[in-house]
Amino acid sequence: MNPLNFYRDQPLFGLDIGHSSLKVMQLDTTTGKPPRVLGYGVANYPAEAVKNGVITDQKALHDCLFKLLSQELVGAIDTRRVACTIPTTNTFSRPMKLPPMERADLTEAVHLEAEQYIPIPIANLYIDYEISHEDAKGIDLLMVATPKGIIDSRIKFLEAVGLEPVALEPTMNAAARLFAVADSSHKQPSILIDFGSVAVDVAVFDQTMFVNSTIQGGSDTITELIIKQLGVPAKEAYDLKNNNGIAPGARQQQIKEAARPLLDNLVREIQKIVRYYNDRQSLTHHKIVQVITIGGGANMPGLSDFFSAELHLPARKLDPWHAIDFAGLSMPGEIDRSMYITVAGAATLNPKEVFA
């Protein structure tokens, strides 16, 4: 038996360190059938325990994870190997086209290119890349760089609680993997919008990630804008956002006007990304054909219709759960399912990819 292959076959679970919560999920992906959920759960921690992506209060996250695994878990987690997320908003990514070269020279070339675009010394970053296309004319790839403090704080936390980190990846990459696994339209060029609580990540997915961007402000921002615009208490603003949203109704115009600063900024950024991608793909005619929303903010009524009208593309919320077997475990409630998309994407990482 090859020891390395044996090791690569060992299971892992996904861990998503969010704005103020930890989510875990373990999937069995070895049967050739739809992924089967072995265990999942969520628990909250004080938002100030993580600052700009860096875990600053290790004990707070330790206590949260202990509570999650001992009290809040549905099913079971039976492995210590973990694929952990890092916030896309705290990463730098850029598509690159490089001339043909040997793989031994590629890393240095990526680092030299990255120095031109990233406002942080390269010595303070971890840099990785994924090749999307390669031919005699050159190499297309997506470069991702993350401050070392973010990565190092996660590794320190995971090792301190007895876990073995085997992969760390941006949240949008994890969500895109789940889109590719669970949505039949994933082969069509798509805009992915991850509507989080404090930021919105936008990416193009066409067989792989091509480009992504982050817009500051998210679901919590819309709640704050409703409070300011309508002069209502926080609880009422939260309910208006989640129950009425910007769908047709008596409060539609008021809520839409309140949310407009964020939504208009988001639409402008998406339009720039669509133009950038479509221009690069003009020779192959691979045009973006749809918008897929994910994240807790995607639950706001009327959001998909708004994007469809503004972007002139069909838009819908990602619903991957028909392709995942909960195997007798109770599913999260309909509203809560969106919070598990990123961690489910991390959990679908094939253990054999870790050392690929």
Image: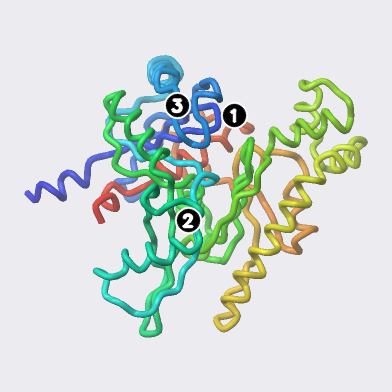
Of pointers 3 and 2, the one earlier in the residue sequence: 3
Quick check: 200 left or right of 150? right
Q: Which residue is mark 2?
A: 180
Q: What separation in Å lies between label 1 and label 3 (alpha carbons)?
A: 31 Å
Lower position in the chain sequence, tag 1 or tag 3: 3
Query: The residue under label 1 is which amino acid type?
Result: Gly
| Secondary structure at numbered mark 1 | loop
Q: Which mark is residue 333?
A: 1
Across and down, in percent, residue 165 comes to 30, 37
Of residues 181 and 97, the one nearer the viewer is 97
The spot of residue 108 in percent (x, y) is 32, 65
How packed mark 2 is, by other alpha carbons closer than 10 Å (few <14, some 14-19, many 20 or more), is some
Dot 1: within a 10 Å radius of its alpha carbon, few (fewer than 14), some, or many (20 or more) residues?
few
Q: Circle 3 sits on which residue?
A: 56
Q: Secondary structure at mark 3?
A: loop
Residue drawn 62% across the image and 53% down it? 292
264 to the left or right of 11: right
